[in-house]
Amino acid sequence: MNDQVAEADMPREFVYSVAKSYTRFPGGRRRKHGEHSGEEFRESVVLPLLAQYDLITFDLTGSAGYSSGFLDEAFGELGSILGFKEARRRIKIVADDDPDAVETAWQRIRDAASEKRGH
């Protein structure tokens, strides 16, 4: 099956609530920093969802807060993996109670995409 057919068969959209489906208490950057790390979230949640859905909305609402390390590792790496344009096309990040977390996540994605391009 070629990639175009696979993408056409991919379910369109999925909404993932971090607080309801992962944890209300996100951890640090890496697994070695403790439970519910950004690295663990990216590898066990984000990347598998990207393989299954064309558009994913990550709802950050309802957590106790997000460290910049968690956001960088969970989402920032997507800038390197997907590039900024593709990340914007395939990912939405929302948070009714923490707009700074959304801004930080997108800044990390933007930074990683720029580093990948060598700027």
Image (cartoon, rainbow, N blue to C red):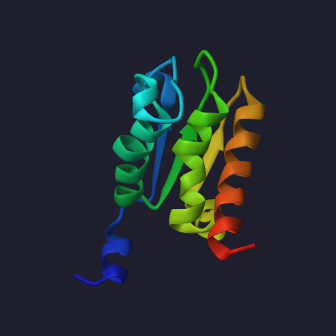
> Total number of numbered labels?
0
| Residue 48 x, y percent position in the rendering | 34, 51
Q: Residue at x 61, y 43 (%)?
A: 72
* Quarter of the figure that contains the N terminus: bottom left
Q: Most extreme residue toward the front, as rendered?
A: 32
Image vertical order of residue 17 relative to residue 106, above or below? above
Q: Pick whichever, 18 or 44, lies toward us.
A: 44
Q: Residue at x 49, y 41 (%)?
A: 15
Position of 56 compared to 66: left or right? left
Q: Residue at x 70, y 27 (%)?
A: 96
| Residue 12 x, y percent position in the rendering | 44, 59
Quadrant of the image occupied by residue 39 = top left
Image vertical order of residue 22 relative to residue 49, above or below? above
* Quarter of the figure that contains the C terminus: bottom right
Position of 41 compared to 110: left or right? left
Q: Residue at x 63, y 43 (%)?
A: 93
Q: Most extreme residue toward the left, as rendered?
A: 1
Q: Pick whichever, 31 or 66, lies toward us.
A: 31
| Residue 23 x, y percent position in the rendering | 45, 21
Quadrant of the image occupied by residue 98 = top right
